[in-house]
Image (tube, rainbow, N blue to C red):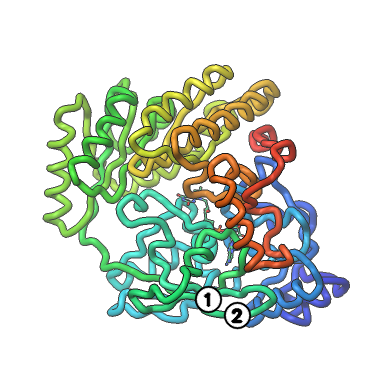
Amino acid sequence: MAASPNGIARELAALVGAEHVLEVPAGSEYNHDLSRRRGVEGRADAVALPGSAQEVAALVGWCYDHDVPITPRGGGTGLTGGAVPTEGGVVCSLERLRRVRELEPSLWRMLPEAGVPTREVQRLAREHGLFFAPDPGAAEQSQIGGNVATNAGGPHALKYGVTGAWVAGVEVVLAPGELLEVGGWAAKDVAGYDLRSLLIGSEGTLGIITAVRLRLLPAPAAAIALVVFLGSREEGCAAVDELLGSGLRPSVLDFLDGDALGPLAGSYPGSAPDGAGFALIVEVDGSRAEAQAQRAEMLEILGGFPMVADEPADQAALWRWRDGVNGVLTGVRGAKVSEDVVFPRERLREGLERFEAIASKHGLRSCSFGHAGDGNVHATVLVDPAREDELDAADAVSEELFELVVELGGSIAGEHGVGSLKRGRLESQWPRRALELHEQVKRAFDPKGLFNPGTKLARYPAARRSYQSRKEAR
Ligand SMILES: Cc1cc2nc3c(=O)[nH]c(=O)nc-3n(C[C@H](O)[C@H](O)[C@H](O)COP(=O)(O)OP(=O)(O)OC[C@H]3O[C@@H](n4cnc5c(N)ncnc54)[C@H](O)[C@@H]3O)c2cc1C
């Protein structure tokens, strides 16, 4: 809907065209992301859909001149409230920046604009025999700019790294409205501080990414995925250690604990044994011969464990099953509260055990799943959204989980970002001097504090942090 030509909207219309400025009714999707269930909602004064990097620069320039907050928005699939205009102002949606400016198959590289959907980047690479390795779960809706801004992960991050590992450079609009490039195609560059890495994962708080130089790889000829069912969490974690300790490099090493596996067993697209207490989803890749050899080696390594390995004939169905985890677990009791955290891998078993004990102490049913090889766990409690006591208990579980993660030397955020939901939690993880540097970096890039205010704050009063599982559940 075009905005009535008044106030901010009229001014923005002069920059990007009236038809590209939207009115924002209270329920508009531009006021939230997928953390809405957790109560994170904003109220944008206007949404602007710039059609070029130059228009983004003009928008930022206008916001900086007028002290108006500006929140970049990609596909809106974030789970931590990063793209939410919690302090009002302008939402800058990148959805019209959808051009792929360069695709050079022989040089293994691509330069998409920020608004190109992740799936499109993956598809284009494949069409040219190449491979864009990052595979975050909402690839149909998320944008490459959003993936870079959150440094998104996914199952293949174990072997290939997170999104930032594939970013050679970013085109970005910085305060007070300047378009520039950071990084480039040079394979090695240590000439200055690594500004590119500062922008990767900055969640829209330092500038607005308008295009990304991506490195690609030749696509592996073959990938074989197996599900390995084990008797218990103890055996499952020991199997992870054995596999990785052997020097094998699986491309994926995901897990589901017994409590996650139970509700999912019925929809498994192969033959799942009864009573399994842990499952590993393992993928190996390479040339056909390499993949087969690694598969055999993996089974040999796991031969010491009582386990059942299953290789579903329909491998695509296996990944659809894995992608369906969230929906199935939500359905068990009507709602779930899931936290994205990381344990050092050698403390994975302890982390999972102690998380279960925390949930149980608070009377809640829990389960865990995620990327075992990275120690990246989606620690989950299953709740009845109508039960106030369970929702309060879920808050308490999350608090204790974050304390546990820090005690074990892990991280309060593995791949979903900090957004507004986890603001201030870094304070328990980093030393004071590092927190100060974090804040100084923000001020250096954004002296007026207008880029996505309220997001990714290193420090924030705990009393105002209200953890809102109650709203998530609804
Ligand atoms: C079903 C499901 C599965 C998921 N699986 C994964 C997963 O496996 N791994 C994972 O890492 N995440 C996962 N996510 C979370 C989410 O998809 C990722 O965080 C994704 O990278 C967000 O991209 P987006 O384009 O939707 O960004 P948005 O949600 O729109 O924004 C995310 C953050 O990036 C900022 N931003 C967006 N675009 C730009 C830009 N051009 N310039 C500067 N800042 C920008 C926003 O301000 C915000 O802070 C999943 C989400 C869902 C719903």
Q: Which mark is residue 171?
A: 1
- Total numbered circles: 2
Indicate the quadrant of ligand 1 in the picture.
Answer: bottom right
Q: Toward which corner of the image does residue 52 lie, by quadrant?
A: bottom right
In the rendered view, tell whether residue 212 sits above or below residue 460.
below
Measured as percent of width and height from the top left, residue 57 is found at 66, 78
Picture disc at residue 179: 2
Dot 2 or dot 1: first in sequence order is 1
Residue sitting at 83 percent across and 71 percent down?
8
The image quadrant where one finds the N terminus is bottom right
Residue 82: x %, y % from top left: 63, 54
Disc 1 on helix, strand or loop? Answer: strand
Q: Residue at x 71, y 70 (%)?
A: 48
Task: Name the one closer to the observer, 441 or 171.
Answer: 441
Query: Residue 33 at x, y = what percent?
Result: 64, 52
Amino acid type indicated by mark 2: Leu
Q: Is residue 248 left or right of residue 330?
A: left
Check disc 1: other Cα within 10 Å, few if <14, some if 14-19, many if 20+: many
Any part of residue 266 in sight: no
Badge 2 marks a residue whose secondary structure is strand
